[in-house]
């Protein structure tokens, strides 16, 4: 039984302010908010209530979070499907949302072009290596960036 006294409302307000401060810097998934509040020592009831309130206000939205996260990870040194899936799962994003967001933002053709661009950039750095060694380096580099085996093989065949 949770008491709805003064200490409860004070704790609730502290938790709310804490999460709003966090959300002022960047967006968070529901799981991340849960973890942050839990780490601060807030109880399950407070955490659930704050999360519910902020979800209703659309300040916490896993789908929007996933879209922003994937867009950020595709700029600069892009990541492939596998790595993005793993990272989003770690952040507590629902598999259906992950599937939808990746289908929207990283279709196969775009992923191929990103992998090809990365591979070409890496090849410029590895000019002096032999053909087999270059293939191996490219394979492990792209695999480490989260690209799928079939896609990597396709890219390597195109550029070597």
Image (tube, helix red, strand yellow):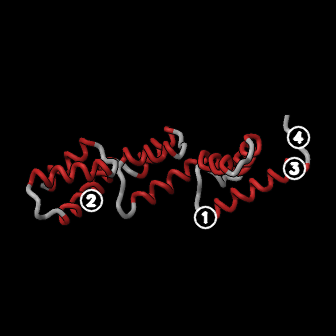
CB within 8 Å, label 3 to label 2: no
Asked whether, in this view, residue 6 is left or right of residue 101, the answer is right
Asked whether, in this view, residue 130 is left or right of residue 27, the answer is left
To which residue does mark 4 refer?
Answer: 3
For marks 3 and 2, the one nearer the N-term is 3
* Mark-to-mark CA distance, 1 and 2: 30 Å
Residue at the location (23% across, 47% down)? Answer: 152
Q: Nearer the viewer, residue 76 or 107?
A: 76
Q: Nearer the viewer, mark 2 or mark 4?
A: 4
* Mark-to-mark CA distance, 4 and 1: 32 Å
Element type where label 1 sits in the image: helix
Asked whether, in this view, residue 45 is left or right of residue 106, the answer is right
To which residue does mark 3 refer?
Answer: 7
Figure check: 12 above or below 22: above
Using the rendered view, name the quadrant where residue 123 is placed: bottom left
CB within 8 Å, label 3 to label 4: yes
Residue 79 placement (x, y as % from top left): 36, 53
For disc 2, the neighbor class at 10 Å (few under 14, some 14 to 19, many from 20) is many
CB within 8 Å, label 4 to label 1: no
Q: Nearer the viewer, mark 3 or mark 1?
A: 3
Element type where label 3 sits in the image: helix
To which residue does mark 1 refer?
Answer: 25
For marks 1 and 2, the one nearer the N-term is 1
């Amino acid at each position: 039984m949770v008491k709805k006294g003064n200490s409860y409302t004070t704790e609730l307000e502290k938790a709310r302010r804490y999460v709003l401060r966090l959300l002022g810097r960047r967006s968070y998934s529901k799981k991340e908010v849960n973890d942050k509040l839990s780490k601060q020592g807030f109880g399950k009831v407070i955490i659930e209530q704050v999360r519910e309130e902020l979800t209703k206000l659309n300040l916490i939205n896993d789908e929007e979070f996933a879209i922003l996260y994937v867009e950020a990870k595709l700029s600069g040194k892009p990541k492939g499907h596998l790595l993005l899936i793993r990272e989003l799962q770690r952040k507590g994003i629902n598999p259906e949302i992950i599937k939808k967001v990746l289908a929207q933002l990283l279709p196969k053709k775009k992923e191929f072009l990103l992998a090809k661009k990365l591979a070409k950039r890496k090849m410029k750095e590895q000019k002096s290596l032999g053909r087999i060694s270059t293939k191996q380096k490219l394979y492990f580099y792209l695999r480490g960036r989260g690209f799928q085996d079939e896609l990597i093989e396709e890219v390597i065949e195109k550029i070597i």
